Amino acid sequence: MEQRRKTASRPARRKPGSRIHAELAAGIGELILNGTYPPGSLLPNEAEWGRRFRASRTAVRETIKTLNGKGLLVSRPKIGSRVEPRERWNLLDRDVMAWHRAAMDERGFLLALQEVRRILEPGVAVLAAARRTPEQLNGLEAALDAMRTATGAKPMVEADVSFHLRLLAAANNELLAPFGIIIEQALASMFDFTTRHAAKPERILALHADVVKAIARQDPEAARRSMAALLDDTDGILAVRGA
């Protein structure tokens, strides 16, 4: 009995074929996102994908099911798999977001992302100022301190992403939680660009600090203005650097 308990407590081994499944999903997903297979087009059959990726039909079949679940495809018996309209793609899915980012040119991706931030983040800051807990404020301050003490671009980007994830959490609205995917994945690309190209990095820190101060004193309007100023600064960096 003791032996059985020990065996059950061991972490599950990685399933055989998981790597090829990931490669298949990424390979087909990127071909859809970059327009090789536009909405409405039929994909090659399972045998063709199997030859391309040296994968079994079972692996291809499971991958197609995965892509169906992400809103990229719809499959019908005797017809095959057809690419769904773009509005049905689940861009808040981690994989789909990554494929989307890989498929777009950097300028187009960053500008589209900045539009989303303009819509989302000032409102998030307003909610955070009104609803944040003391623990959440401490988390924001800790992320800001990590940005101040970062000794290179990578830790700076990681701290910046953490700051915005904590800000989203401090809004205390569970329906906003899926947008954490945008912050976690897409904003990392944005912050990598702005960190490398900012003429005055200290200004970025000061603008983040203004957001924290407004949230600390629970001033929603000041939080909105501070976040808008931070986004204005990002707009300036993107414009100067041609993104």
Image (spheres, rainbow, N blue to C red):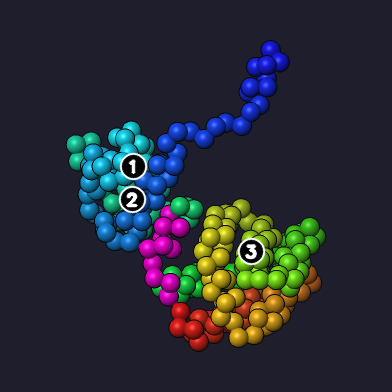
User: For residue 176, which quarter of the picture?
Assistant: bottom right
Q: Foreground mark, 1 or 3?
A: 3
- The answer to whether any part of residue 155 appears in the image is yes
- Residue type, mark 3 in image: Glu
**The magenta segment:** 96-107
Name the residue: 56% across, 71% down: 192
Residue 64 is labelled as 1
Element marked by disc 3:
helix
Location of mark 2 (residue) = 28
User: Residue at 23% of width from left, 39% of height from top?
Assistant: 47
Labelled disc at residue 158:
3
Residue 121 horizontal/vertical position (percent): 59, 69
Q: Does the magenta stretch include residue 97?
A: yes
10 Å crowding of disc 1: few (<14), some (14-19), many (20+): many
Q: Mark 1 and mark 2 in contact? Answer it, CB < 8 Å.
A: yes
Q: What element carries label 1?
A: helix
Indicate the position of residue 202 as horizontal and vertical percent values: 69, 82
Amino acid type at circle 1 is: Ile
Q: Which of marks 3 and 2 is nearer the N terminus?
A: 2
Q: Dot 2, how many residues are within 10 Å of its Cα: few (below 14), some (14-19), or many (20+)?
A: some
Sequence-wise, the earlier of marks 1 and 2 is: 2
Q: Do the residues labelled 3 and 2 touch (CB within 8 Å)?
A: no
Q: Residue at x 41, y 62 (%)?
A: 102
Q: Quadrant of residue 210?
A: bottom right
Give the dominant element type of the magenta stretch: helix, strand or loop: helix
In which quadrant of the rendered image does the N terminus lie? top right
Which of the marked residues, 1 or 3, is nearer the chain's N terminus? 1
| Residue type (three-letter) at the residue carrying disc 2 | Ile
